Image (spheres, rainbow, N blue to C red):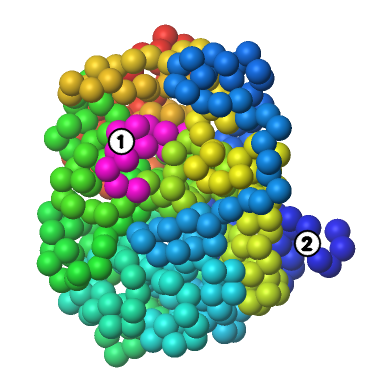
Amino acid sequence: MGDEPVNVKEYQILARQALPKMYYDYFAGGSEDQHTLRENVAAFQRITFTLLSYEYAILQHAINSLRPRILVDVSKIDMSTTILGYKTSAPIMIAPTAMHKLAHPEGEVLTAKAAAACDVIMGLSFSSTCTIEEVASSCDAVRFFQLYVYKRREISALMVKRAEANRFKAILLTVDTPKLGRREADKKNKMIAPQLKNFEGLVSTKVDDSDGSNLEAFAARSLDPSLSWKDIAWLKSITKLPVLIKGVLTREDDVIYILNLSLCFLVAVKAMEVGVEGIIVSNHGARQLDYVPATINALEEVVLAVQGRVPVHFDGGIRRGTDVFKALALGAQAVLVGRPVVFGLAAKGEYGARRVIEMLKDELELTMALSGCPTLNDITRNHVRTQSDNRHCRINYLVAGSIFNFNDDNDNLMIFMCTYPFVRIVDAAQKCIVLDLNTVGRPVVFGLAAKGEYGARRVIEMLKDELELTMALSGCPTLNDITRNHVRTQSDNRHCRM
Ligand SMILES: Cc1cc2nc3c(=O)[nH]c(=O)nc-3n(C[C@H](O)[C@H](O)[C@H](O)COP(=O)(O)O)c2cc1C
């Protein structure tokens, strides 16, 4: 590879070379087995383009007035759009990611400058290393502020006020982080989070945790795990800015039992009830609950449920302009890009972050040209083919008086589903609680062989900790809340059971 990357993925290689292992692992990693991390990217690769044939186009024309998309004049491609009324050169935003000074000494200020240079919207993380004021005064990029709700509400409220005073245009409320996901690389590296300047004099990020990452210990101390729907009313009462909820892969308690309702439907409807101005389909870059679906597999259901009432945005796994196109075809209004921008920043500072966005824009432009789409409005669902289309297993469900299409898909499409390991862990830990250690089997024996009683105990403790976190991230405060609807097995896929 020459020094000048030709695609976004190559920036990751440069970032790896540029960063200390602890920081690279922090930016690159996902949670636990990193299944969802891999899936976020791999699921895009299973979506292909449909080049509309004449017959197909005629058929579509008969059905819904689509015109043949051949011999279209693509000499001018227009990728510009508006997001919440703000003009942007492309439907691509910078996702809020924490602590950019770990990637580059100048941190988020450079990222914001890159956003301004590319004329795209910048999402600033609550956990940024530059202050809200520093980022605001560095450039004129349109900026959205991402919010975590801390146990000490007054701190979150203060940050919202500061964002508002510094002309941030929207609040992205992250709803998938009642607790921090288990990022095992950070534990192993004993990741140390720097003091966040925004909180100087308010909260110290210095937390002793000789066992693992101090980031995890800090999050456990700060994040409010009781955050619920009613808190959106609180947030709306303290700000006039539009609120978007980010991370719709949580479940909603009272409705999970209603057969065949997918969580995205529930979240979408709930979200609209509480008056949010937009939804971001996100699994936090696969850093929270592992084994949730790849976000691209969850997107379409959310879009169908929302029915255009609020904009649906998307993030997770975008590495190519073709990925952006696919997300738009499946109904996203815009996408957010996380790691690639940080890798660009780490490798080549502002220039690198800018090149990442430019490359994605260039690739999207080319994809639009080669697909016969001179404008974003020309991109339709018919331009892409997903695995579920291939299996011809679309099922119509009658839900609350409306018909929604739910695809039968063995790629974790039903977004409220957790997975087999969850069941296994529940099984194991439940048995541990009744002290029938033999039923856990090999792991306990291996623990015993490695470190005696301590090892066996740690095996059980780890399973218990993981179960506790899985329950928290699945919205299950008690064991009774765990239902068959939380998991999808291979046989469900085979029988199209929902
Ligand atoms: C290193 C890192 C830090 C992140 N920090 C935050 C954060 O502070 N707040 C937040 O809402 N999401 C955070 N995210 C999630 C991103 O906003 C976004 O959802 C995700 O990065 C999209 O996936 P991608 O990295 O594959 O593009 C973070 C992601 C990464 C990789």
At 66% from the left edge and 62% from the top edge, which residue is drawn? Answer: 358
Residue sitting at x 38%, y 86%: 133
Q: Amino acid at mark 1?
A: Gln
Q: Residue at x 63, y 56 (%)?
A: 361
Left or right of 283? Residue 451 is right
Q: Decide: is 218 above or below 251.
A: below
Does residue 144 appear anywhere in the picture?
yes
Residue 299 highlighted magenta (yes or no): yes
Q: Is residue 97 above or below residue 393?
A: below
Q: Residue furthest bottom?
A: 201
Give percent across and percent down for residue 299.
42, 38
Residue where numbered disc 1 is placed: 307
Q: Specify which label sits upstream in the sequence, 2 or 1.
A: 2
Pointer 2: what residue?
5
How crowded pointer 1 is (Cα within 10 Å; few <14, some 14-19, many 20+) is rated as few
Prevalent SS, magenta region: helix
Q: Nearer the viewer, residue 67 or 37?
A: 67
- Whether residue 479 is visible, yes or no, is no
Q: Position of residue 256 (x, y in %)?
A: 21, 30
In magenta, the rendered stretch is 297-311
Q: Is residue 284 left or right of 362 when viewed as pictured? A: left
| Residue 184 vs residue 142, the one in the foreground | 142
